[in-house]
Image: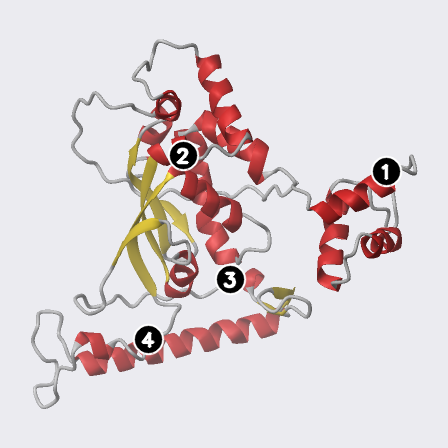
């Protein structure tokens, strides 16, 4: 199971917006979270600002009808679970969510790799950027992993973590000082020092680091939102983006409770097997035993044609999750 530890969410003050009657499908769970910011990292947040559709919308799209309200909830659930179980994803694309997020630039650059959404980001060419930088807590500072080139290893010792935080803070402050010097802007469009030029904002931002906070609106259909969540809730995903994924997961499971439960059952907490893994598993289970050593699984992988050490280790880890690997 890939269950993540529960996040203790900190809610920020919500924004009141005008409401009106509507004939479109309503999700009570989504309505609950509209304009309610969830604090993420030290200065960030994510909040649901709009959505389209509900669980019933998914059923309607699948049936190409407008019979909402005429069917039993058990039938809606049965159909949605069938769709997710058999990878019929198009009906899930008929519902969507729109989030407003404030996040460090390096997190945004990971996030934007998911190219199936619409994004509108704060512009440093137009606006003066705020002096807000992400500085990790000590418990999130670690050395480079020795077996994963894009991951973290052991946590830094307390004194090293504190020195790292001090250095990051000093560098961020120095970078922002350079930005302000280049801008030479008093915030009202007038130079702070009339004897110096006001460098264009699109150029003045160059000294800034990727731990500076940015903001954007991110709109995505439900199918692609679930795909994002499946990847970014994984324990191997970077901690910082996982924080945002966990916050949005909390909203998603209330906004689309039937669809989200099916997503959890058949994808998020499910386990898939490759052809080679099925061969290994079949051979092992033929012995009528219930547990096997890593060496036995390695030998079985070789028999199945797996020679890549990393892939073999992934097989061992996957089987360990199933409880069939002895220590």
- Secondary structure state at the residue bearing disc 3: loop
Residue at x 22%, y 82% (from the top left corner): 181
Q: Check residue 208 in the rendering and tell me which mark sits there, or answer none.
A: 4
Q: Which residue is mark 3?
A: 137
Compared to 128, does 203 lie above or below? Answer: below
Disc 3 vs disc 1: Cβ atoms closer than 8 Å? no
Mark nearer the N terminus (1 vs 2): 2
Visible in this render: residue 29? yes
Q: Position of residue 68 (x, y in %)?
A: 33, 15
Front position in the image: 238 or 197: 238
Q: Check residue 90 in the rendering and tell me which mark sits there, or answer none.
A: 2
Mark 4–mark 3 Cα distance, whole angstroms, equals 21 Å
Residue at x 24%, y 67% (from the top left corner): 129
Rendered image quadrant of residue 191: bottom left
The crowding category of the residue bearing disc 2, from other C-alpha atoms within 10 Å (few below 14, some 14 to 19, many at least 20), is: some
Mark 1–mark 2 Cα distance, whole angstroms, equals 37 Å
- Secondary structure state at the residue bearing disc 2: helix
The crowding category of the residue bearing disc 1, from other C-alpha atoms within 10 Å (few below 14, some 14 to 19, many at least 20), is: few
Residue at the extreme bottom of the image, as rendered:
195
Mark nearer the N terminus (1 vs 4): 4
Mark nearer the N terminus (3 vs 1): 3
Q: Nearer the viewer, mark 2 or mark 3?
A: 2
* Quadrant in which the N terminus is drawn: top right
Q: Which residue is mark 1?
A: 285
The crowding category of the residue bearing disc 3, from other C-alpha atoms within 10 Å (few below 14, some 14 to 19, many at least 20), is: few
Rendered image quadrant of residue 143: bottom right
- Secondary structure state at the residue bearing disc 4: loop
Q: Position of residue 223 (x, y in %)?
A: 42, 39
Q: Nearer the viewer, mark 1 or mark 4?
A: 1
Visible in this render: residue 95? no
Mark nearer the N terminus (2 vs 4): 2
Tell whether 158 sits left or right of 225. Answer: right
């Amino acid at each position: 199971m890939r269950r993540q530890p529960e996040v203790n969410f900190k809610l920020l003050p919500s924004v009141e917006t005008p409401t009106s009657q509507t004939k479109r499908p309503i999700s009570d769970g989504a309505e609950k979270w509209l304009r309610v910011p969830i604090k993420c990292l030290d200065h960030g947040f994510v909040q649901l600002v709009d959505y389209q559709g509900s669980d019933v919308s998914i059923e309607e799209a699948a049936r190409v009808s407008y019979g909402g309200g005429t069917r039993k909830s058990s039938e809606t659930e049965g159909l949605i679970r069938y769709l997710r179980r058999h990878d019929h994803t198009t009906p899930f694309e008929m519902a969507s969510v729109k989030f407003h997020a404030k996040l460090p630039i390096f997190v945004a650059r990971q996030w934007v790799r998911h190219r199936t959404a619409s994004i509108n980001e704060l512009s440093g060419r137009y606006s003066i950027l705020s002096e807000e930088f992400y500085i990790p807590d000590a418990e999130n500072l670690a050395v480079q992993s020795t077996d994963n080139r894009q991951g973290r290893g052991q946590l830094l010792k307390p004194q090293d973590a504190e020195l790292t935080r001090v250095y990051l803070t000093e560098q961020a402050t120095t970078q922002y000082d350079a930005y302000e010097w280049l801008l030479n802007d008093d915030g009202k469009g007038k130079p702070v020092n009339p004897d110096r030029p006001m460098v264009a904002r699109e150029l003045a931002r160059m000294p800034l680091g990727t731990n500076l906070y940015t903001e954007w609106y991110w709109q995505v259909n439900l199918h692609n939102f679930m795909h994002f969540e499946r990847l970014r809730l994984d324990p191997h995903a970077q901690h910082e983006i996982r924080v945002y994924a966990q916050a949005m997961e909390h909203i998603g499971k209330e906004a689309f409770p039937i669809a989200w439960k099916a997503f959890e059952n058949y994808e998020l907490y499910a386990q898939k097997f490759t052809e080679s893994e099925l061969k290994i598993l079949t051979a092992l289970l033929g012995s009528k035993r219930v547990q096997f050593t890593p060496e036995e699984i390695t030998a079985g992988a070789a028999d199945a044609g797996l020679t890549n050490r990393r892939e073999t280790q992934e097989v061992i880890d996957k089987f360990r999750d199933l409880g069939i690997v002895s220590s």
